[in-house]
């Protein structure tokens, strides 16, 4: 396997020059080192341009654990797209951000697979596995459980450590979480995270079982709780009372993956087909699109969702992340009604299929 050196301009980091032995490479990291992914690596360089590695661990962590570092780089790319300013002098939380609306702090985290369960890269594409994707209850339940662990852990960290830091006091606290907890996590859209935060579960299985009964699309219902394998119940509705008022909002995306780089980069080494599903106006009906990469238009922030806490002690104004196709859930301060902004044109799903033109580039 050829290794490609790629220096991140302006940051002093070289993400792809090995700093650990190959046997320590994360499976995802090893998979992106092949020559035909050069265009995608170059795009990641642009995302990371200017990122300050304050503790000197990012490159090693990127090569050995991958997902959490990739998520931080992605978030930084989003912040740059918005024109935010990052204050790098503070080691924690992960980002101290200034926008034209307000200053806020962001702690990044990922939902990871439970011990003894399949990792997100353990896809078999067997008939049984593909059949399982025709129903969503198991996938969504596992995602809810793992997302809960990630968010509870960072909320606890805020209470025990972050809240006392001078640069954090008085600022909205945002948890940015990405799901990597199981194979095919990219199918979940917002179903698990919305259920976890608001106890608002969109039951696609009920719709698939009897579409005629739900002419307006999948029904929504309250689950109350989900049950872990050991019988422990996880109560849903984190944002339905003041218990987690420290958390101003949760930023989420299940589409911030290497596939976004594949979909956005101009890669002459491959014939690339992008399969995607987009919400369409006026009510957000899903529309499948299959096209060549050159015809697919996707931005860094497509797939981004922001879930606001109506009981937040320091609310994050929706204006901070307002942008085309960025989904936000919040209470409208003028009407007192729930607002679902951006959901009628958002990216819901994406899968990239790339065929190498010249096998010598493998």
Image (spheres, grey):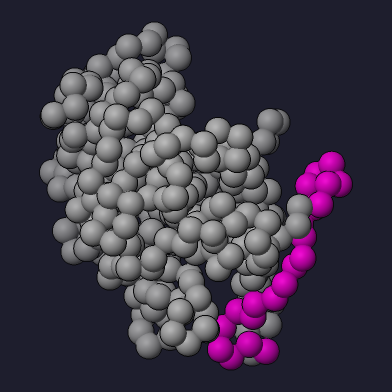
Residue 318: in magenta span: no
Q: Residue at x 35, y 31 (%)?
A: 90
Kindly give the residue lying farthest to the right in the view shown.
Answer: 231
- Quadrant, the C terminus: top left
Q: Is residue 271 above or below residue 223?
A: above
Q: Position of residue 248 (x, y in %)?
A: 50, 57
Residue 353 in the image, given as x and y percentages of width and height: 33, 50
Q: Compare residues 127 and 69 and report the one nearer the observer.
A: 69
The percent coordinates of residue 340 (x first, y second) are: 46, 76
> Is residue 94 something that shows in the picture?
yes
Residue 304 drawn at (x, y percent): 38, 59
Question: Which residue occupies 47% across, 87% down?
Answer: 335
Extreme residue toward the top, this view: 21
| Number of marks drawn | 0
Above or below residue 145? Residue 68 is above
Q: Which residues are magenta?
A: 213-233
Q: Is residue 219 magenta?
A: yes
Q: At 38% across and 68% down in the image, what residue appears? A: 318
Q: Give the camera-side residue of 136 and 316.
A: 316
- Whether 129 is drawn above or below 342: the answer is above
Magenta segment, prevailing SS (helix, strand or loop) = loop
| Quarter of the image where one finds residue 351 | bottom left
Tell me what residue is drawn at x 29 percent, y 18 percent. 1
Q: Nearer the viewer, residue 170 or 150?
A: 170
- When asked about the image quadrant of residue 106, the answer is top left
Front-lying residue, 327 or 269: 327
Q: Quadrant of residue 54?
A: top left
Can residue 130 be seen by looking at this rendering? no
């Amino acid at each position: 396997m050829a290794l490609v050196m790629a220096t991140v301009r302006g940051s002093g980091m070289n993400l792809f020059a090995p700093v650990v032995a190959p046997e320590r490479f994360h499976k995802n990291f090893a998979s992106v080192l092949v020559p035909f992914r050069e265009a995608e690596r170059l795009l990641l360089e642009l995302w990371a341009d200017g990122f300050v590695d304050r503790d000197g661990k990012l490159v090693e962590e990127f090569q050995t654990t991958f997902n959490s570092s990739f998520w931080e780089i992605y978030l930084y790319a989003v912040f740059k797209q918005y024109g935010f300013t990052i204050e790098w002098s503070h080691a924690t939380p992960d980002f101290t951000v200034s926008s034209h609306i307000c200053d806020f702090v962001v702690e990044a985290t990922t939902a990871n697979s439970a011990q003894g369960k399949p990792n997100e890269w353990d896809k078999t594409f067997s008939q049984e596995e593909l059949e399982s994707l025709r129903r969503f209850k198991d996938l969504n339940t596992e995602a809810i459980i793992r997302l809960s662990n990630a968010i509870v852990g960072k909320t606890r960290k805020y209470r025990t450590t972050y809240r006392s830091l001078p640069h954090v006091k008085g600022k909205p606290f945002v948890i940015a979480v990405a799901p990597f907890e199981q194979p095919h996590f990219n199918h979940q859209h917002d179903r698990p995270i919305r259920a976890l935060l608001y106890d608002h579960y969109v039951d696609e299985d009920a719709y698939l079982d009897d579409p005629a009964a739900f002419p307006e699309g999948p029904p929504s219902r309250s689950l109350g709780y989900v049950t872990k394998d050991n019988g422990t119940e996880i109560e849903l509705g984190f944002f339905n009372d003041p218990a987690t008022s420290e958390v101003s909002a949760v930023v989420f995306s299940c589409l911030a993956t290497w596939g976004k780089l594949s979909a956005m980069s101009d890669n002459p080494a491959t014939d690339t087909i992008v399969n995607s599903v987009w919400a369409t106006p006026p009510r957000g009906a899903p529309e499948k699109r299959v096209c060549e990469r050159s015809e697919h238009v996707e931005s860094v922030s497509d797939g981004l969702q922001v879930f606001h806490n109506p009981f937040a002690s320091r609310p994050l104004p929706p204006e901070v992340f307002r942008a085309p196709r960025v989904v936000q859930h919040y209470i409208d301060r003028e009407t007192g009604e729930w607002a679902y902004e951006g959901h009628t044109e958002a990216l819901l799903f994406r899968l990239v299929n790339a065929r190498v033109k010249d096998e010598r580039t493998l």
